[in-house]
Amino acid sequence: MATIEKRRAGDGICTYRARVRLKGHPSATATFVRLTDAKRWAQSTEASIRDGRYFKTAEAKRHTVAELIDRYEREVLACEPKNAKNTRRNLRWWGARIGPLTLADVTPAVIVECRSALLATSTRRKRPMSPATVARYMAALSHALTIAVREWQWLDDSPMRKVSKPREPRGRERFLSEDERQRLLNACKVSSQQWLYAVVVLAISTGMRRGEILTLRWPQVDLKAGRILLHQTKNGSSRAVPLSGVALALIADLAKVRRIDSDLLFFGDDVSKPFALDNHWRRALEVAKVHDFKFHDLRHTAASYLAMNGASTIEIAAVLGHKTLAMVQRYSHLSSSHTEAVVASMNERIFGRIANE
């Protein structure tokens, strides 16, 4: 039940101390200048305690955003080194912006204001920060808030759930045409960089990411089984990549002359590090006269070729290592003929062939 005690200070000013006591719960107190405020607080607090909401709110008032970020870095990021550098950078932006605020003060409106500030931020290239980048900043804080809700009991709910992320543009769909592919491969063959041709063939054949290819080591390669095992990938899961055809032959040739002082497939002047790709890649694009094309587009090229050769979205996702189908839906229109053939086969099996009259 709630009680209200009137108090008079030495200077004659009256205050009202409200106290709420319910069996099985710690007592809650607050002091007000006006009696009506004390009664209103007592009524709402008693209702909140009965509903199990009050003390979670009180906990949120005891911790700041800065404390949240510090604990998250110590306990979560320390155990997840992959991409921790970028996440830590994003979280520190939030710490500089709203670090002193208590978690109770971090409302959806506060997050929306920060989202607008991020969208108005200029990058090093003097361009507005992209929606995709802003979404990653928001995702970093969102996960920290979720941990605070689920594991630390610092919050009743995450305010980020009520804030929408900026809409990202549709994913890039650039891939090599037949003619472009041949010109680019020819340019890579005559490149002064001995690994460039094999690297590009591997990217087109397997859909592996640039970093996955450049850091590839011989213990990951199984020539007899025709596969590459990737232990650390972008989505955090290991995956086996099928290796066949020209790509398998090229890797087998490299294995015959591999160095004993480095287990990297594609090493640089320093055999302990991958070779520098960028300048040789740009030069090959210029020689091949292939425009508006990035190395990552080789991954799109592999996915597009798979789709055009009848692979389903599930199969493409398995090859590329995507956990969901959302990322490969962009290639679904390229496999429409395969889909039509599957439907036609199913109907013929169930209903039989319809004779042409």
Image (cartoon, rainbow, N blue to C red):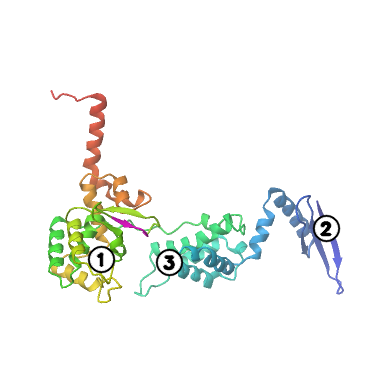
Q: CA distance from mark 2 to mark 1?
A: 77 Å
Residue 216 locus on image (x, y percent): 29, 63
Quarter of the figure with residue 177: bottom left
Question: Taking 330 as reference, is 144 above or below it?
Answer: below
Q: CA distance from mark 3 to mark 2?
A: 49 Å
Q: Residue at x 43, y 62 (%)?
A: 136
Amino acid type, residue under disc 1 in the picture: Leu
On whether residue 97 falls in the magenta region, the answer is no
Q: CA distance from mark 1 to mark 3?
A: 41 Å
Amino acid type, residue under disc 2 in the picture: Ile
Please tell me the numbered disc located at residue 86: none
Please tell me the numbered disc located at residue 119: 3
Q: Is residue 1 in view?
A: yes
Residue 133 locus on image (x, y percent): 40, 64
- Contact between marks 3 and 2 (CB within 8 A): the answer is no
Q: Magenta part of the protein: which range? A: 228-233
Comes first in the chain, label 1 or label 3: 3
Looking at the rendered structure, the secondary structure element under dot 2 is strand
**Left or right position of 248 against 14:** left
Q: Quarter of the image containing the C terminus?
A: top left
Q: Which residue is mark 1?
A: 265
Comes first in the chain, label 2 or label 1: 2
Looking at the rendered structure, the secondary structure element under dot 3 is helix
Please tell me the numbered disc located at residue 4: 2
Which mark's residue is nearer the viewer, 2 or 1? 1
